[in-house]
Amino acid sequence: MLIDTHTHLDDARYNDDREAVIARAREAGVEAFVSIGCDLTTSQAAAALADHYPFVYASVGVHPHEVKHIQDDWYDEFRRLAKSEKVVAYGEIGLDYHYNHSSPKEQRDRFREQIQVARELKLPVIIHTREAREDTVAILREEKASDVGGVFHCFSGDAWLAEEALDLGFHLSFSGILTFQNATALREIAKKTPLDRLLIETDCPYLTPVPYRGKRNEPAYVSQVAKQLAAIHPEFSLEEIQRRTTENAKQLFKIA
């Protein structure tokens, strides 16, 4: 069995066939999904999906692109949503200096605030970081994010960032990027990541893995990430990779 630890199941690209997408994933052995919040609306949608399906869980939070839109009442709504046992994480949050849809200073300020809310709620954090590795690690340390732990989602950083993340006690989650031809360095990082810190995800509908490149991504394809990890770790069978990544996800997100 598999757990897709990072999906955007509420995305409009699934509006015409969401039930079929979920059914295909279940047939492919996906035991559970975490649907991710990126702002108030998507956090509410993720929580609603988690309420509807027994095998779907949710996170709440505001993506660094969207933090400029945070209103005074958003954190109170996240606190309300987090009362549900199906809300298992806070995120995705972090820093993204590639696009700067929100200003870097606003991103840093809101990142700190959201780590503080996550610690208050005792929820692990789901980290998005792009071209901001030093600031991301510094803020995580300063705000004591290790108290709740979490995951660097869709990990695509370098060896330095991987080492820092692991030193913080965080997990690394690998996506379909791991299957890309030009991801040699990333595969080497995945090879060196301890088995008890590995998670897998699709980040669907984005980042479709080989051999489905060019198609809309969906949770069933998380199996391709597991297969790539098994190829990277020949000392472990595919079944062992599936079992351990599933155990890791259940432990981090407190999924029964």
Image: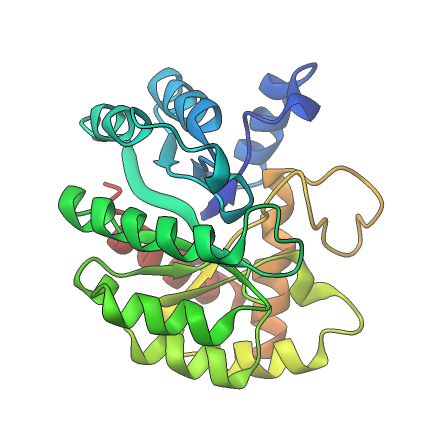
Is residue 196 visible to us here? no
The answer to which of 39 and 5 lies nearer the viewer is 39
Give the position of the C terminus as an image quadrant: top left
Residue at image location 57% in from the left, 70% down from the top:
230
Q: Indicate the position of residue 250 as horizontal and vertical percent values.
A: 29, 50
When asked about the image quadrant of residue 214, the answer is top right
User: With respect to residue 182, does 68 lie above or below?
Assistant: above
The answer to which of 93 and 167 lies nearer the viewer is 93
User: With respect to residue 52, does 10 lie above or below?
Assistant: below
Is residue 211 visible to us here? yes
Q: Is residue 63 left or right of residue 210?
A: left
The answer to which of 145 and 113 lies nearer the viewer is 113
The answer to which of 73 and 117 lies nearer the viewer is 73
Residue at image location 31% in from the left, 80% down from the top:
167
Q: Indicate the position of residue 71 as horizontal and vertical percent values.
A: 37, 28
When asked about the image quadrant of residue 51, the answer is top left
Q: Indicate the position of residue 111 as horizontal and vertical percent values.
A: 37, 53
Q: Is residue 228 left or right of residue 171?
A: right
When asked about the image quadrant of residue 80, the answer is top left
State the scheme by which the image is colored. rainbow
Query: How many numbered discs?
Result: 0
User: With respect to residue 178, does 49 lie above or below?
Assistant: above
Q: Indicate the position of residue 105 as horizontal and vertical percent values.
A: 46, 57
Residue at image location 68% in from the left, 44% down from the top:
206
